[in-house]
Image (cartoon, rainbow, N blue to C red):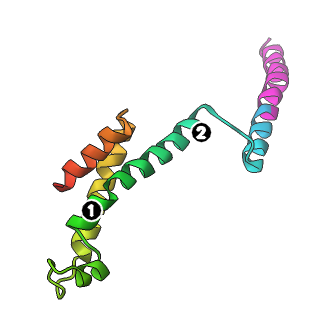
Amino acid sequence: MPVIRWLISKTIQFFLGSAQERRSDATAKRKEEGTFEGASASKDRNFEENYAAAARLLRTRIDQEFPDAYYARLSSGRNSSCDYGQDRALAIDTMSIAIAMALRNGATVQQAATAGAASIGI
């Protein structure tokens, strides 16, 4: 009796398992060709676009508050001997994390930009 159960289970697994394997192979092939669109593909694409839009909204404010070395030398109100690079890098890292977390939690682009600005105090 155990032999018959084993034989039946192996037969079912052969037919059903091979269908699943074919679907997996077809999906993998479409992913390699770049034609596969899963449920998360558009969500990820929207995240990238929203993140870029929020960062663009803050770029001018960041440049004013944390200038890079070239613009710091050219502006009259800045100390040209001071290196703002470390402060700028830290501010951009902090802002990026805040924008990403806000977008992952379902915020709009404007809300994410506001969260990024609040995280670095501008």
Which numbered disc, 1 or 2, marks the residue closer to the eye?
A: 1
Quadrant where the N terminus is found in the figure: top right
Is 46 on the left or on the right of 120, as rendered?
right
Identify the residue at horizontal 33%, vertical 54% (top origin).
Answer: 96
Q: Mark 2 falls on what kind of element?
A: helix
Which residue does the numbered mark 1 point to in the structure image? 62
Q: Residue at x 78, y 14 (%)?
A: 5
Query: Dividing the image into 4 quarters, which one contains the C terminus?
Result: bottom left
Left or right of 105 in this view: 6: right
Q: Amino acid at mark 2?
A: Ala
Q: Residues within 10 Å of mark 1 (few under 14, many from 20)?
A: many
- Quadrant assignment, res 39: top right
- Along the line of sight, the residue nearer the viewer: 100 or 73: 73
Q: Give the magenta range.
A: 1-22
Give percent across and percent down for residue 46. Answer: 51, 40
Q: Position of 12 compared to 96: left or right?
A: right
Q: Is residue 16 magenta?
A: yes
Q: Residue 94 in the image: state x and y as whole percent.
A: 26, 57
For marks 1 and 2, the one nearer the N-term is 2
Q: Is residue 115 rendered to the left or right of residue 43?
A: left
